[in-house]
Image (spheres, rainbow, N blue to C red):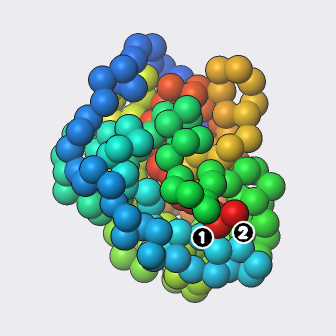
């Protein structure tokens, strides 16, 4: 089942060519500083407890609707994501993501514990640590917005190649957290971890 889901996601994410990131949406807050105040300590790490929503760092609201930025945060290209976290914070590496996932019980069950209690089409979580993961969907390079309500996909600072980087996802149909990768021009959610 997990392989089938990953194949479907990979197919959806690889079908488009273009420049979704070429034109930046300016809807939403110009600098949502509240994200830096909403934090949670999980194990030895301190994470923001909501997705980043800072229009001054670029990105887009899902379907360019400000209410989606307010609920899910903004979606950023990888280049934007690497510069989006405020001072004292940074985009987490794969190793930092894996540390979080391991603390929450491992890749097969961590999603259930990290997902918000409400906000998912199905498969809401228990939010045991206050991470409150929400399914913000993603944007393809051609400007197509997909799977809000069903998929949360966050950038990692770890590169795969000059054109792609890793991300971590949670999907509504299972309790897992998966390492995945995308072209750097896709727009995904951002969570910051404290330096």
Q: Nearer the viewer, residue 66 or 14?
A: 66
Work out whether mark 2 precedes mark 1 in sequence or the reverse, and give the earlier one. 1
Estimate the spatial distance between the alpha carbons at disc 2 and disc 1, rounded to whole Å: 9 Å
Look at discs 2 and 1 and give the one toward the viewer: 1
Please identify the quadrant where the C terminus is shown: bottom right
In the rendered image, residue 77, in percent from the top left (x then y), is placed at 49, 34
Check the image and report above or below for 38 versus 78: below
Check the image and report above or below for 77 versus 57: above
- Residue placed under numbered mark 2 in the picture: 100
- Residue placed under numbered mark 1 in the picture: 47
Check the image and report above or below for 98 versus 148: below
At a point 64% along the width and 74% down the height, the residue shown is 46
Q: Nearer the viewer, residue 63 or 162?
A: 162
Tell whether 56 sits left or right of 157.
left
Where disc 2 sits, the SS reads: helix
Instruction: Say which mark, if any, is on residue 177.
Output: none
> Dot 2: few (<14), some (14–19), or many (≥20) neighbours within 10 Å?
many
Asked whether residue 17 is in view, the answer is: yes
Where disc 1 sits, the SS reads: strand
In the rendered image, residue 98, in percent from the top left (x then y), is placed at 77, 60
Q: Are marks 2 and 1 in contact (CB under 8 Å)?
A: yes
């Amino acid at each position: 089942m997990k392989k089938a889901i990953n194949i479907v996601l990979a197919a959806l994410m690889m079908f488009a060519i273009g420049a979704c990131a070429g034109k930046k949406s300016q809807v939403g807050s110009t600098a949502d500083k509240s994200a830096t105040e909403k934090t949670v300590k999980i194990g030895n790490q301190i994470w923001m407890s909501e997705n980043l929503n800072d229009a001054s760092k670029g990105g887009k609201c899902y379907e360019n609707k400000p209410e989606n930025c307010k609920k899910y945060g903004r979606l950023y290209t990888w280049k934007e994501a690497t510069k989006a976290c405020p001072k004292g914070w940074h985009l987490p590496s794969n190793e930092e993501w894996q540390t979080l996932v391991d603390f929450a019980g491992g890749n097969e069950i961590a999603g259930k514990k990290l997902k918000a209690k409400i906000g998912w089409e199905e498969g809401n979580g228990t939010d045991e640590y206050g991470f409150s993961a929400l399914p913000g969907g993603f944007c393809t390079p051609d400007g197509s917005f997909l799977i809000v309500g069903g998929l949360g996909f966050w950038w990692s600072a770890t590169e795969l190649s000059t054109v792609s980087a890793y991300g971590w996802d949670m999907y509504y149909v299972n309790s897992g957290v998966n390492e995945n990768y995308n072209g750097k021009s896709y727009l995904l959610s951002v969570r910051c971890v404290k330096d």
